[in-house]
Image (cartoon, helix red, strand yellow):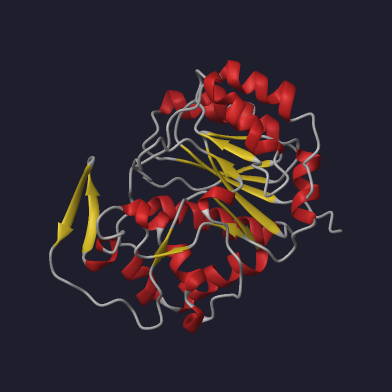
Amino acid sequence: MSRRLPAVVVVAHDKPRHFHRLIAAIEPLPTFVHIDANTPPDVHAQMTAGLPDTVTLLPRLRAGWARYEVLEAELAGYRAALESTDAEHLILLTGADYPLANVSAIIEYFGKNAGRSFVEVDPVPRAAWGRNGGADRFWFRQWPWGKHRMVLPIPRRVPAGVERAGGSQSKVLCRAHAEYVLDLLDRRPDLWRYFRRCWTPDEVTIHSLLLSKALGGPDQVFESRDQALWFMDWGEDPTPSPHWLTTAHFPGIREARTRTDRPALFARKLSDESAELTDLIDSDLRTISIPTA
């Protein structure tokens, strides 16, 4: 079993108390942090104060809601991790995530899954994305303006070989798949120009490239939402983003963490007001081993 440490990429913008608790929970994993350039200076100062040596701060981009810079920050984290570590897996977290297992258990789990990525990759149309299944995310050039979706209503072609797909931003990439994505985008600037004007590029770009066998996409079994490594509450009806987690969610979190078939290793979303829930996770879940089928 490989004992190489996974690397962690964290894309964050606020909630400094929870952010520091997250960083402490994933030590000593090498961690690459992007903090939104829109974050106020006082909050940025709180978030960066006293960070351990395991943390590398990435150049800051204005990675606001639905902007392509969110994806740029993610890719920059992968690139830095690949260049400076021998990590076999790259774990993407937001500043609102939290691990449900201790670091030793996480290392052991991914050590048993070398060469395997854990990503939702659903072909478009996908039911969770409304009437046209998210196909409209690809049809036109789009960008956010404030909290509004701006669309240039001139149809455009999907680049040859691209299979449209989407899914959650949350993911764990194995080294080979992260290298494939970065290399492809480096060699094909036309793909980058195309995906940066899709809607929410961080939810469609990597997913589509991984699915696109004609572009060299890998043979890979990806995780569906009900088997993902994250616990999230999307409510009874599909919503644009998961609900904030409270102590009322703990029974469900515990059930997901202790199941033998694909246990949840992370949870989203927690905040500075989630200390009571985080205490429960630390005392009850992060002290136990990961079950095996």
Q: How many marks?
A: 0
Q: Nearer the viewer, residue 83 or 233?
A: 233
Q: Nearer the viewer, residue 284 or 256?
A: 256
Query: Dividing the image into 4 quarters, which one contains the N terminus?
Result: bottom right
Query: Which residue is painted at 61% across and 26% down in the image?
Result: 251
> Residue 168 at what x, y percent from top left?
46, 51
> Residue 162 at what x, y percent from top left?
40, 77
Quarter of the rendering containing residue 257: top right
Query: Which residue is painted at 84% across and 54% down in the image?
Result: 3
Quarter of the rendering containing residue 127: bottom left
Work out which residue is located at the far right of the displayed protein and give it. Answer: 1
Query: Which residue is painted at 38% across and 28% down in the image?
Result: 40
> Residue 180 at what x, y percent from top left?
57, 72
Work out which residue is located at the far left of the displayed protein and give it. Answer: 153
Q: Nearer the viewer, residue 286 or 198?
A: 286
Residue 9 lies left or right of residue 263; in this view the side is left
- In the rendered view, tell whether residue 276 sits above or below residue 186: above
Residue 149 lies left or right of residue 25; in this view the side is left
> Residue 219 at what x, y percent from top left?
61, 75
Residue 5 lies left or right of residue 201; in this view the side is right
Query: Which residue is painted at 33% across and 79% down in the image?
Result: 159
Residue 105 lies left or right of residue 81; in this view the side is right
